[in-house]
Image: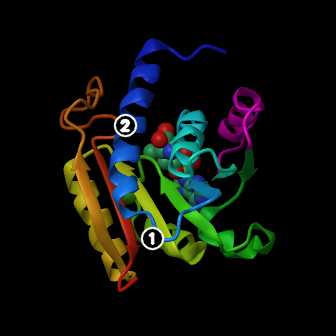
Amino acid sequence: MQMPPSIAEDMSKLKTLLHDSISPHLPVAAVKDMRILNLACGRCDEAETLIQVGSELTKGGEVEMIGADIRIREIRQARETHGHLPAKFLIEDATKIDQHQELGDDFNMVFLRHQNFWHGQELWKKIFDQGIAKLRPDGMLVITSYFDVEHRLALRALESLGMEVISNTRNKQSRALADAPGKSVDRWVAVLKRRGT
Ligand SMILES: C[S@@+](CC[C@H](N)C(=O)[O-])C[C@H]1O[C@@H](n2cnc3c(N)ncnc32)[C@H](O)[C@@H]1O
């Protein structure tokens, strides 16, 4: 199924942003393969983009993505749309993802697009904490945000959980959301690592 042009453009911008934000911070030992955990992924418009970025960063290595969201309809849609990709989509409460032990805790990247910290700070702090626990020691956590204050608050919460911001970029070309002044698609993209790694 073809993406609407606006989403295709969002993806093209996100791809460049992710590549440019992450590549300077990859672990010194080359990353050969990449496991990506995409929490609260919704219908996961970004699935192919993330896999392409993973493939570029690993210079053609194997990339696997697991997407998880609590909403059944969105996950079903993601499964239908992205069935051709090396991706699995799980109906999961991300505040309890530690109970899904077979997922492992060796993800190179935990990704949260348009995290929703503003609308439930305690809930999202739990989701962040669970995501961090799924990272390899040298793994990266990447968030994007719709608006400035939420982004700042989310970064502060992640710092309180032992993470360090290593890249934080305002997407100057981000598409404004109609009827939501000050909000835009992937307005901010931040990359974090465990402090001291
Ligand atoms: C702002 S939407 C972002 C969705 C998608 N990442 C995007 O960029 O379009 C926030 C998402 O968080 C999901 N969510 C909220 N609480 C959750 C939880 N406890 N576990 C998993 N997903 C959750 C919602 O279902 C929703 O899809």
* Spot occupied by residue 75 in the image (x, y as percentages of width and height): 70, 41
Identify the amino acid type marked 1.
Val
Q: Residue 10 carries which label?
A: none
Q: In the picture shown, does residue 122 fall above or below 33?
A: below
Q: The C terminus lies in which quarter of the figure? A: bottom left
- Secondary structure state at the residue bearing disc 1: loop
Q: Name the residue under label 1.
A: 28
Q: Which colour scheme is used?
A: rainbow
Circle 1 Cα neighbour tier, 10 Å, few/some/many (<14 / 14–19 / ≥20)? few
* Spot occupied by residue 25 in the image (x, y as percentages of width and height): 37, 63
* Spot occupied by residue 76 in the image (x, y as percentages of width and height): 75, 36
Q: In the picture shown, does residue 128 fall above or below 36?
A: below
Q: Is residue 135 left or right of residue 62?
A: left
- The structure residue drawn at horizontal position 61% and vertical position 36%, both measured from the top left corner, is 43
The span shown in magenta is 69-86
Q: How many marks?
A: 2
Q: In this view, does 138 lie to the left or right of 68?
A: left
Identify the amino acid type marked 2.
Thr
- The structure residue drawn at horizontal position 24% and vertical position 50%, both measured from the top left corner, is 169
Q: In the picture shown, does residue 42 fall above or below 167?
A: above
Q: Mark 2 points at which residue?
A: 16
Residue 13 appearing in the image: yes
- The structure residue drawn at horizontal position 65% and vertical position 61%, both measured from the top left corner, is 93
